Image (cartoon, helix red, strand yellow):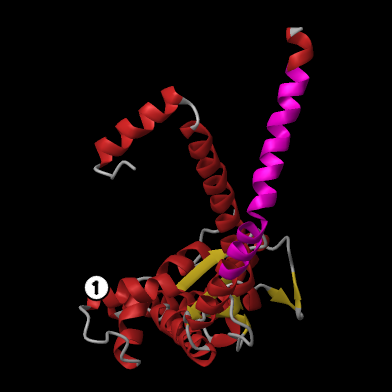
Amino acid sequence: MDIEREPQESEISLMDLLLVVAENIKLLILGPLLVGLVALGIGFTLPQSFVSQAILAWPTATPTPQQAAAMMVSPLVLDPIIETHQLSDGKPIQAAREALAKQVKATVGKDGLLRLDVTDTSAVQAQVLANAVIDGWLKSTVPGVQERQDLEKRLEFAQNGLKSVTSLIERLSVDGVVSLAQPLTRGEAGTSLVAVGELQARYLSEVIAIPRALQGLSRDVVKQPPTLPTEPVAPKKSLMAVLAALGSGFALLLFVFMRQAWKNAAADPEAALKQNQLRRALGLKIH
């Protein structure tokens, strides 16, 4: 007999739940719909966010893309932007710097390219700030006074070395053809001409690279200039409305079941007594 009752009791419980849902169907449908519409309206009032994107790459190993990404959110780059574009808005420089740093995102992909994303409530301003970040970072690649002096000394040494090695190779030429077997003069008979050629290539490389280092990186490293966004990335109004409707629907369903359970409990004397005790504890009136 007990076994036969279990399916029946389960069936009655399920029917009771369906009955509760049916009795409150308007609330369970119109409530979430209304909340979703309100959330959609709120989404239209929230400030929009636009993202300007740029891609950078350069052939040199210094600075590395990771170093460049870190430099783009450093005070050395951000502070001049804050001053030029008057972004402090009366806030301390530290607060303004932190706010701007949150708008700038520089990441390095597996392909080694640096991707710069700058967010702002204005599409045009997002593009302007992205260009400002790139320009500020490029200025940071120009060497300082001491580093410039060291590079100039290296350049002078490399130029002199290149002239000397080139002159030596010319002297070792016989009738316009370099003899690989001919030894060098002045006690360097054991040095091969191949080694001299490698030394010449090393000096030539420095003579080409050092002037570039003195100038810093140029804007040629920008493979994709900052874009002018046409669509906002946030807020996602439709997603807000759907989530609000689903959340309120679940909350209303839970409320309906709890209210029905409270009503059903009132029919049980023992449960009704507990209800009265709960009302007294909460300071509610007992009818």
Q: Is residue 147 visible?
A: no
Q: Percent x, y for residue 207?
A: 52, 79
Q: Is residue 250 above or below residue 74?
A: above
The verdict on residue 208 being magenta is no
Q: Residue furthest top?
A: 1
Depth check, front residue: 72 or 190 = 72
Identity of the amino acid at label 1?
Answer: Gln
Q: Residue at x 73, y 17 (%)?
A: 6
Q: Residue at x 49, y 74 (%)?
A: 161
- Secondary structure at badge 1 equals helix
Depth check, front residue: 68 or 261 = 261
Q: Residue at x 22, y 80 (%)?
A: 91
Query: What's the magenta region?
Result: 6-34
Q: Is residue 279 visible?
A: yes
**Pointer 1 residue:** 94
Q: Percent x, y for residue 137?
A: 43, 79
The verdict on residue 24 being magenta is yes
**Viewport quadrant of the N terminus:** top right
Q: Is residue 227 above or below residue 284?
A: below
